[in-house]
Image (spheres, helix red, strand yellow):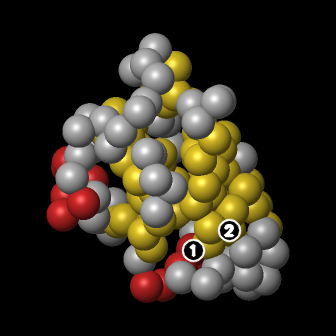
Amino acid sequence: VQLQASGGGLVQAGGSLRLSCTASGRTFSSGFMGWFRQAPGKEREFVAAIRWSSGITYYTDSVKGRFDISRDKNKNAQYLQMNSLKPEDTAVYYCAADSSLILSSIWHWSHYDYWGQGTQVTVSS
């Protein structure tokens, strides 16, 4: 399985970006897809995840109300719409997926089997 992420860039505080992540090599029917981010000198942290079958979403508190994760089953893809961006959102963003993941494990990066390459998001103040 390969995940291809895109959509990062440079944006001013208050602006928006949309990240995309397309999976190839396997059609997902279960498990979760999600987004993590890693700022320089910090551990990779959970941002959002979506249960593939139902579309139920989960977010870290710092992005609730600003970010929206979604998925397109037909395209085997997930998206992260990021609004009201803040300088502290600056990081490399990674998409991840795992077809056998359970809910209790979605919060930590070590539980995901598949990863996309990172895409840089920089928010200027």
**Where is residue 80, by image quadrant?**
bottom right
Disc 2: CA contacts within 10 A as few (<14), some (14-19) or many (>=20): many
The mark that comes first in sequence, 1 or 2, is 2
Do the residues bearing badges 1 and 2 touch, measured as CB atoms within 8 Å? Answer: yes
- Residue 51, compared with residue 15, is above or below; it is above
Amino acid type at circle 1 is Asp
Circle 1 — which element?
helix
Image position, residue 91 (x, y; %):
52, 63
On residue 82, which mark appears?
2
Q: What residue would you read off at disc 1?
A: 89
Q: Name the foreground residue: 32 vs 84.
A: 32
Instruction: Tell me what residue is drawn at x 60 percent, y 55 percent.
Output: 70
Res 14 visible: yes
**Where is residue 104, by image quadrant?**
bottom left
The residues tagged by marks 1 and 2 sit, at their Cα atoms, a distance apart of 9 Å
In the rendered structure, the answer to whether residue 82 lies left or right of residue 112 reads right
In the rendered structure, the answer to whether residue 72 lies left or right of residue 113 reads right
- Residue 113, compared with residue 35, is above or below; it is above
Disc 1: CA contacts within 10 A as few (<14), some (14-19) or many (>=20): many
Amino acid type at circle 2 is Met
Image position, residue 93 (x, y; %):
52, 54
Res 34 visible: no
In the rendered structure, the answer to whether residue 107 lies left or right of residue 10 reads left
Image position, residue 36 (x, y; %):
42, 58
Image position, residue 11 (x, y; %):
79, 67
Instruction: Tell me what residue is drawn at x 41 percent, y 33 percent.
Output: 29
